[in-house]
Image (spheres, rainbow, N blue to C red):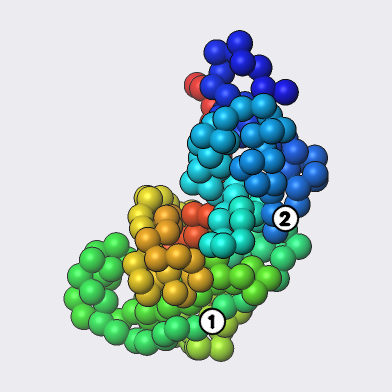
Amino acid sequence: MVNKQSPMPMYYQIEEDLKQRMDRGEFASGDMIPSERELSLHYDVSRMTVRQAMSNMVNDGFLYREKGKGTFVAEKKIEQPLQGMTSFTEDMKQRGMKASSRLLGFETIVAPPEISRKLDLNDEEKVYRVQRIRFADQVPMAIETTFVPVNLLPTLTEQTVQGSLYHFVEAELELKIEKATQMIEATIADADQAELLQVASQSAVLHIERHSVLNDGTPFEVVKSAYRADRYKFISDIYRS
Ligand code: 16G
């Protein structure tokens, strides 16, 4: 099963084989995978080679370890297309998952200079600062901090942001959200983020910042979010022009 003559490293061949076995459903998420000893016998390679394959797969989020118990198959990551400008609620619905939120904060503040600039506001203009944990089927996926101008959405309430902000803006206020610029950066979860996202401290998270505008060009939100890197992967189609 492992081709020792191949230029492909043996640990890599094992990783590929295990991934295929996961795709075929031989191992489902939450299943314990065989021990290092069993795998080294199965693939007829050294335990060092198996260990290398395992740590790569743990680092890449395909497997996770539980101290004193073993190594398990991780949940498949959510594949989020980068092209469409969707809301969290829509994203989850599309996947047959239930979106919910826990509100961590809802306040009206004078826009900090950075936010004021990004939302093109006048001095001292107010914004809502909304902080939510977003859940998919009760599993925390992201922490989002949203800034929206009070003048634009004077009737926004805590109640509204328990549900979908985009639905409120489009269906209730009949504003048209047109586009956004989005930036994605790799970061490490600080202690608070790790606790809220229920991941180990120092886990990788994806910091995403979205600046959205309405169809008349009015900036409408600045959103800073931390997505779990063990549960999310962002994908896009690209064209060579
Ligand atoms: C997504 C957006 C966020 C937007 C939210 C609205 C990213 C990184 N973030 O989470 O900018 O505010 O959807 O969701 O895609 P809602 O309509 O469910 O409240």
Image location of residue 122, percent across then percent down: 23, 73
Image location of residue 34, percent across then percent down: 69, 46
74 vs 207, left or right, is right
Seen in the picture, residue 69 relative to 37 is either above or below; the reply is below
- How packed mark 2 is, by other alpha carbons closer than 10 Å (few <14, some 14-19, many 20 or more), is some
The N terminus is located in which quarter?
top right
Identify the amino acid type marked 1: Arg
Q: Is mark 1 within 8 Å of ligand 1?
A: no
Taking the spot 37% from the left edge, 87% from the top edge, the residue there is 107
Taking the spot 61% from the left edge, 61% from the top edge, the residue there is 69
Element carrying mark 2:
loop
Q: Residue at the top extreme?
A: 5
Instruction: Please identify, in this view, whether the residue under mark 2 or under mark 1 is nearer the observer.
Output: 2
The residue singled out by tag 2 in the image is: 31
Taking the spot 57% from the left edge, 54% from the top edge, the residue there is 64
Seen in the picture, residue 207 relative to 133 is either above or below; the reply is above
The residue singled out by tag 1 in the image is: 102
Image location of residue 166, percent across then percent down: 56, 69
Occupied quadrant, residue 40:
top right
- Observer-nearest of 152 and 181: 181
Seen in the picture, residue 12 relative to 201 is either above or below; the reply is above
Element carrying mark 1:
strand
Taking the spot 55% from the left edge, 13% from the top edge, the residue there is 7
2 or 1: tag closer to the N-terminus: 2
229 vs 164, left or right, is left
